[in-house]
Image (cartoon, rainbow, N blue to C red):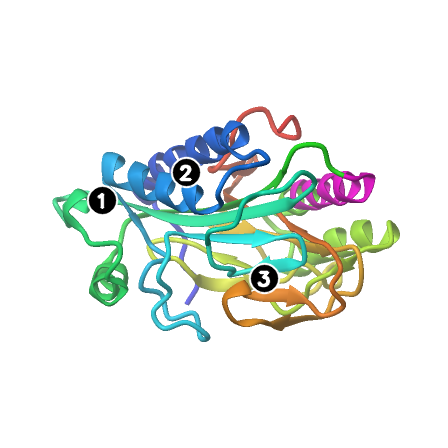
Amino acid sequence: MITIKSQREIEQMKHSSKILADIHIHLRDMIKPGLDMWAIEEYVRKVCKEKNVIPLQIGVDEGYYNPYPYATCCCLNDEVAHGFPRHYILKEGDLLKVDMVLGLVEDDYCDVSKLNFDDAKSMIAIQEGFRGGVADSAWAYKVGEVSQEVADLWEVTRECLYLGIEAAKVGNRVGDIGAVIQDYAESRGYGVVRDLCGHGVGPTMHEDPLIPHFGKAGHGLRLKQGMVLTIEPMINTGGWEIDHDGERGYVTLDGSLTCQMEHQFVITKDGPVILTTQGEERTY
C-alpha cells in the first residue's frame, strides 16, 4: 500500500535523517587506508545508543539472512549491496559503500542504550513493531588515492542519483526516474543493476512503491505530493547482472566494479526535498 505522509511523519524523518547524514559526514574522515572496516559498524552502533535511534537493519528478514545481524551493510569494489561489515583492512584504491537505516524513537517506545545489538533475534520484535521516523541512506567512499576508473564510476553514480531525484516531481511517473538514470549511465558505457531498486519509506523501512533505476519515461505509477521515497542507483562498470555470494551479499556477475549512492526525499509541490542531505548537493 502506498501512503501519503503527514507533516508530523515528515518531521520525524527529518530528525532521524539528520542523525544518519551526520554519520555519513563523519565517515568521510574516518574511512581511509588502514582502517578496519568493522570499526564502521562499531561507530554506527555507538551513535545509535547515544542518539536513541534503532538500527533497523538488525533483525530484518532479508531473504538470504534471517535475521540480518548488523546495523550497516558494507560493500567493497564488486559487491553491490547487502554485504556484511567485517574485519577487513581497507586498502588504497578501494571503493566502499556503506548503507544503513535508522529509526527515531519517540513516546518511550524503547531505550536503545539497553538493547542488545548482538542478539539479532531479540531485535526482530523491536524492528517489526517500530512505527516512527525512518531514515535510509547509502553513500560511497573512495579509499585514499583511487584509479581513474573508480573516480569516474563514483562521479557517474552520484550524477545518476541526483538526476533521478530531480525527476521525482508531482505529476511525473516512476518510469521517468528510471529512464533518466538508465539513459545517463548507459550513455557513458555503464550497466544499471535491475534486480534491486528504491522504495517508499515510513513509517516502516520498505514500502510501496518500488522505484527501479531503469525504465521508460511516461510509464508507471504517477508521483504525488507527500510521497517519501529512496532512490539508490547501483551502477556497474560492466554488465548490469548480479548474483548473491553469501556474506559478501550481491556482487556483479562479471566481477566488475560497482557503486551505489542513496538519498531519501519527500515530494513536495515545489519539487523533491532531500531529507538525508549531507550539505550542498553535488559538492560531497
* Circle 3 residues within 10 Å: few <14, some 14–19, many ≥20: some
Q: In which quarter of the image is residue 186?
A: bottom right
* Circle 1 residues within 10 Å: few <14, some 14–19, many ≥20: many
Please give the residue where the numbered disc 1 appears in the rendered image.
105
| Residue 39 point in image, percent of width and height | 42, 41
Question: Magenta segment range?
Answer: 147-162
Magenta run includes residue 152: yes
| Residue 248 point in image, percent of width and height | 55, 64
Which disc is residue 20 wearing? 2
- Marks 3, 2: nearer the viewer: 2
Q: In this view, does 280 lie above or below 251?
A: above
Q: In which quarter of the image is residue 43?
A: top left
Identify the element where label 2 is drawn: helix
* Residue beneath the point at 37% across and 34% down: 19
Please give the residue where the numbered disc 3 appears in the rendered image.
197
Q: Quadrant of the N terminus?
A: bottom left
